[in-house]
Amino acid sequence: MPPGKRQRQRRRGRQEESREQREMAPPPHQRALLLFPLVFLLLAPPRADAWGKEGHIMVCKIAEKYLSEKAAAAVQALLPESAGGELSTVCPWADQVRWHYHWSSPLHYANTPQVCNFKYSRDCHNSRGEQGMCVVGAINNYTEQLYSYGQKTSYNLTESLMFLAHFVGDVHQPLHVGYEDDEGGNTIVVHWYRRKTNLHHVWDVSIIDTEIKDFYNKSMDTMVEALKTNLTGGWSDDITQWENCENKRATCANDYAIESIHYSCNYAYKDVEQDITLGDDYFFTRYPVVEKRLAQAGIRLALILNRIFDGDKVDDIPLQVQ
Ligand SMILES: *[C@@H]1O[C@H](CO)[C@@H](O)[C@H](O)[C@H]1NC(C)=O
Ligand SMILES: *[C@@H]1O[C@H](CO)[C@@H](O)[C@H](O)[C@H]1NC(C)=O
Ligand SMILES: *[C@@H]1O[C@H](CO)[C@@H](O)[C@H](O)[C@H]1NC(C)=O
Ligand SMILES: *[C@@H]1O[C@H](CO)[C@@H](O)[C@H](O)[C@H]1NC(C)=O
């Protein structure tokens, strides 16, 4: 890996760490008490970037509702016991193992050379130049592995499912297909209202948090219900188009990445510069994009899982709400 890049990656690690510290900083009178655990926090690996937990959970809660009976049964069979039978509980998992499975870190995103299009052959690789090591390659990889469900396989299909469910979410977060130079917005420092953060984090977490707080009575479940309601209402005519995927066996993750870089250019990066303060103007014009991407990710994750586990059915009938 070129030295410049290694430095950037280290910088990213530090930034995340300091963000975590900020978010977890206790009031001054408690600081001394908490010093001991804080030391461990500093030693702990930095938190990974991706839709925050909420984003991933919401994507998977939507997907669960659109699974066919057979696909839902296969998912149940693959889920670890700790999931309590719910796919959504394991959807943040890939972020938790990102530093332990170090090789998986580049699978959460793809970067372009500061252009508003995505080309697999040019952009889908890790820092060592290994082809396919990006979010698009990963979605196809884990989809392919899951096709061996029910046969003898050397893959841990529980992990394949947990990776797949996470990466389908990630590829829909616009800035997970962003510019290489700013690491998908990670190096663009901004203020979200009064709080200092970075542009990537605004799209992973802040917009969703602000919505949940301001629109949905501080309840993620209320937001999920609103998204589901829109899927049967305003968006119902769009679903067929979201599901359109000529690629019969691999996924259409390549198309989803192309959509994301367009949203990055037209919404995420637009009118943003270092140290800018983003508030109502930005929030009210961008949150509809976030909502749409969460809904699309949920629908498409269900589509992929239905094809894998219930293939014969999916080609002739449109996805049905269970
Ligand atoms: C495919 O999955 C295997 C098993 O987890 C992993 O070792 C490999 O790096 C993955 N490749 C891609 C492109 O996702
Ligand atoms: C498969 O992966 C899960 C999650 O990492 C792990 O808990 C489980 O033990 C693995 N199963 C096997 C057979 O290795
Ligand atoms: C908001 O949530 C609280 C409990 O968290 C509940 O008492 C209240 O009725 C809710 N308000 C609305 C408008 O749903
Ligand atoms: C649902 O649709 C309405 C009307 O288009 C929109 O105002 C609202 O933000 C949407 N809610 C969600 C959660 O998508």
Image (cartoon, rainbow, N blue to C red):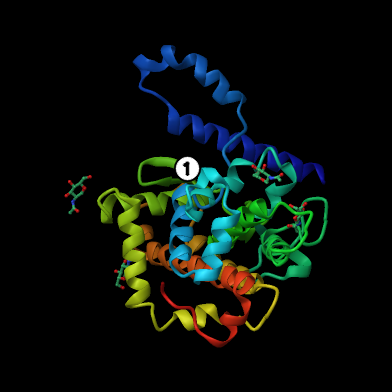
Compared with 140, 31 (above or below) is above
Residue 266 showing in the rendered view: no
Query: In front here: 192 or 209?
Result: 209
What is the x, y in percent for residue 213? 29, 49
For the residue marked with disc 1, what is the amino acid?
Thr
Answer with left or right where residue 124 lies relative to residue 184.
Answer: right
* Residue placed furthest toward the bottom: 316
What is the x, y in percent for residue 142? 69, 61
Circle 1 packing at 10 Å, graded few (<14), some (14-19), many (20+), is: many
Q: Helix, strand or loop at disc 1?
A: strand
Ligand 2 falls in which quarter? top right
Query: In front here: 124 or 82?
Result: 82
Residue 272 showing in the rendered view: yes
When asked about the image quadrant of residue 223, the answer is bottom left
What is the x, y in percent for residue 4? 76, 43
Answer with left or right where residue 156 lies relative to residue 222.
Answer: right
